[in-house]
Structures are given as C-alpha cells and as structure tokens.
Image (tube, rainbow, N blue to C red):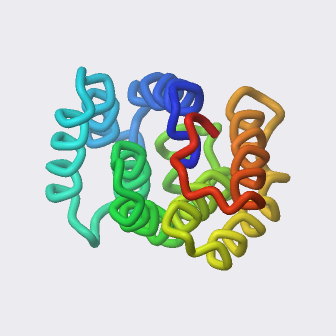
C-alpha cells in the first residue's frame, strides 16, 4: 500500500484482524488470512517479513488470489528497497486481477475487489516514483484516481485519498524520497 506509515497499516490491520473471524465459504476460518494477521502483529519488521514470505511460499504463485494479493501488499509495505517493494506490489496487483467479488465477499461481506485497486495502483505508482520512473508513476496515479469513486468516505477511503494528494505533490517535485505517510 502506498500508505506505508502507521495510519493505513493500522487501519487495514484492524480490518484484517476483525475479518479473520469470518468464514471462508462456510468452511470455517480462513487459516491463511488468520496467519497473515498474526504475522503482521509480530514485533519487528524482519520477523513480519519472514513470516509473510513463508506464507507466500506456502500459498504459491498460483494460489488463492486473495491470499496472494494480501501477502504481496503487506510484504511490499515492509520493503525499504523500492525495486523490491515494486516486485511485491506488482504481485499483489496481478493477484487482484484474478480475484472475484465472490471470493472476497466469502471472506468478508463488506469487501469488493474494486475497493482494492486505488491503493494497489497508488502503491505501484509510489515505487515507480521512488525509482525515478515518473511516467510510469503518473500512469498508475491516474489509474488510482480513476478508481477512487468506489471507496467510501471512511477512514480507509480518506487515507487513500490523502495518500494520492501526498504522492501527487512528491511526483510534481520529482522527489524520489520515501514518503513518511501517504
């Protein structure tokens, strides 16, 4: 996620933690989503990352798109290196393309795939900006903006909208510095 600070990560972690109690197609708790939430609550970025990468290896590149999207998005947030973060964010975006509303609603009725895209594109854009690929960053910024209408006017929606504003300001100045929060 572009918002690589406490704001959005806390917001999403709270949502994810609350959602782990839901069932996956009425078969019981989604153990992988629960493991993701537990990994993110682990103290220390290195341990969080190690646990998430282990989950990625277990799920596999052809595994459940919800799991791949969530893991990829979280691992990207833990990467200091923009190229490495971009790799994980692209994995998350690719997984989202394979994701269906039916699958995300099986995890939690309030979710929709369309709601994932503004943050996913914003994250990809931010990594391109940090790598000085400003044209690619601008394309993903426009895609994030185009998809904003699906977000509610709640904490998450406002955080993503604020992230777009922070990102756009950094893009205009040609900054390649990591943004403290988005």
Q: Is residue 164 visible?
A: yes
**Image coords of residue 95 (percent x, y):** 44, 66
Left or right: where does residue 173 sit relative to residue 95?
right
Residue shown at the point (51%, 39%) measured from the top left = 4
Residue shown at the point (58%, 64%) measured from the top left = 129
Is the residue 56 above or below the residue 135 in the image?
Answer: above
Is the residue 130 above or below the residue 62 in the image?
Answer: above
Is the residue 61 above or below the residue 56 in the image?
Answer: below
**Image coords of residue 14 (percent x, y):** 50, 22
Q: Which quadrant, please, contains the C terminus?
A: top right
Tell which of 179 and 7 is nearer to you.
179
**Image coords of residue 153 (percent x, y):** 83, 33
Q: Is residue 29 visible?
A: no
Tell which of 33 and 51 is nearer to you.
51
Q: Quadrant of residue 181?
A: top right
**Image coords of residue 26 (percent x, y):** 40, 39
Residue shown at the point (40%, 25%) measured from the top left = 21
Residue shown at the point (42%, 45%) measured from the top left = 77
Left or right: where does residue 53 sit relative to residue 129?
left
Is the residue 136 above or below the residue 8 in the image?
Answer: below
């Amino acid at each position: 996620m572009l918002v690589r600070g406490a704001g959005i990560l806390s917001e999403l972690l709270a949502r994810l933690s609350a959602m782990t109690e839901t069932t996956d197609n009425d078969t019981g708790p989604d153990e992988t989503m629960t493991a993701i939430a537990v990994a993110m609550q682990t103290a220390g970025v290195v341990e969080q990352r190690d646990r998430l990468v282990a989950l990625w290896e277990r799920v596999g590149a052809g595994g459940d798109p919800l799991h791949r999207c969530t893991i990829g998005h979280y691992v990207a947030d833990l990467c200091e290196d923009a190229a490495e973060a971009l790799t994980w964010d692209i994995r998350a975006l690719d997984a989202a393309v394979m994701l269906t509303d039916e699958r995300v609603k099986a995890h939690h009725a309030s979710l929709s795939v369309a709601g994932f895209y503004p943050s996913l594109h914003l994250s990809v854009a931010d990594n391109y900006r940090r790598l000085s690929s400003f044209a690619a960053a601008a394309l993903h910024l426009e895609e994030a903006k185009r998809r904003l209408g699906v977000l509610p006017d709640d904490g998450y929606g406002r955080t993503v909208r604020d992230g777009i504003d922070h990102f756009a300001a950094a893009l205009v100045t040609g900054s390649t510095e990591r943004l403290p929060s988005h």
